[in-house]
Amino acid sequence: MNTFSLYIHIPFCRFRCDYCDFFTRTRVAPVRQREIIASTVRQALDAHTTWHAPAPHPGTIYVGGGTPSALDPAAAELLLEGISALRTRLAVHGVSTEASSTAEEIEEITVEVNPEDVNPALLARYADAGVTRLSVGIQSLREQVLRRIGRHTTLDATRRGLETVATHWPGRWSADLITAIPGDDPDGAAADATELLRFGPRHLSVYELGIEPATLLGMRHRRNAIPPISETGQIAQSQAVSDVLGAAGLRRYEVSSWSLPGEESRHNLRYWRLAPWAAAGPGAVGLVPRGGGPEHVTVPRSFPRFLSREDFGVHREPLTARDLFEETLMGGMRTTVGVNRTRIEAVFGRRMETIIPDTLDRWSALTHAPRAEHLALTADGLLLLNRFLVDAFAELDTTASLLRSPPAWPDSASPDATAT
Ligand code: SF4
């Protein structure tokens, strides 16, 4: 079943973290925030009414950023009213949010929050607006690490926020953790994971710290002002966290994602399984069907352009069959269940064995079939995901012309997002 999924980008933060290269702006005046959010809501509503997928069942909404929880209060209210309006609009389009279970309608609305922003009143308002899931940006539960990565918060505020979510939030929630931190060690990383689990998250996203050139951390790295970290050191920290999470009964279902059974991020699963999704808000990117083929829709980062154009200034870029196949591999092979071979054949008109035969041969010891019809990397193989992709993409130089063009996407066989 194809579903309506929507990513809403909120491009505002109070401060920029030293490691962050996401598209976000700090210290934006409340009046400007309100203008941007009002247009973002209009774009979100418009995205649904112009949705071109064959079976527009409502599905998931993800509000990320940026820091949605740090919005000016009036702008935040505009956003929540917009989410409510979107739910109503979906009902008008023939699928009642009242008549059938929420799981079949908008089965998941996630909002990213920072722990220092949350309080019981805000959480109650989120729940009232239909938000079902929070993604809480923790990153570390050690003061010196928060300082080292340039996170503008305190350990007290972080713990208080976690306690508030654990006590007052009625829905599902996830926490983000960062590993592979220069100057850190596996024991420290494991201590973070252990303490975080005491607050009861049933889903964790664990990211290795990337040192991006255009960040303060990148600048310090170039000046040798932060300790070096080897690949072995990075892996040791990540492994220490994996050991803690595994021992607590969570299981990895994607390179960076761990959950208890049934607690997976349904929105993210749709990305990785290449279901279409719409985009709203400056800097957001979507992948939608249009005119018989897939296309990327990129919302401009320029606020004046976004505000002044009737079409929000979006840039549309058609994807070739090869582009889409690469995206299918990039998303699907991140997950522990892998890509669905039958679906590949249905969409691209060729079997995996025809499209990337040499890669399948070369990687046979590090791939397996966790489920009939699937191809996935083993746990050891996942550590080498990028190398697998490089091999597969290189092979496409000679086989891409075999792919059906345009691909039969989105297809009625799009996988059930809840099945992992
Ligand atoms: S809060 Fe998140 S989006 Fe904002 S600067 Fe920090 S890492 Fe980037």
Image (tube, rainbow, N blue to C red):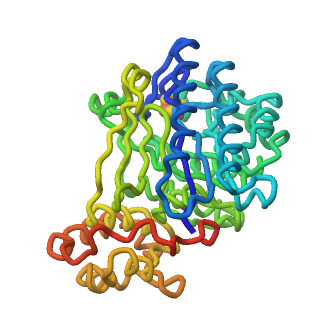
319 on left or right of 260:
left
Q: Considering depth in this image, is 20 or 266 the residue closer to the camera?
A: 266
Residue 307 drawn above or below residue 409:
above
Where is residue 5 shown, x and y percent of the image?
56, 52
Number of marks? 0
- Image quadrant containing the N terminus: bottom right
Q: Considering depth in this image, is 240 or 53 the residue closer to the camera?
A: 53
- Image quadrant containing the C terminus: bottom right
74 on left or right of 368:
right
Answer yes or no: is residue 240 visible: no
Where is residue 336 shown, x and y percent of the image?
51, 71
Where is residue 97 shown, x and y percent of the image?
75, 53
189 on left or right of 365:
right
Determine the residue positioned at 65% across, 52% down.
93
Residue 297 drawn above or below residue 121:
below
Determine the residue positioned at 40% across, 44% down.
210
Residue 377 drawn above or below residue 58:
below
Determine the residue positioned at 30% across, 86% down.
353
Determine the residue positioned at 44% across, 33% down.
20
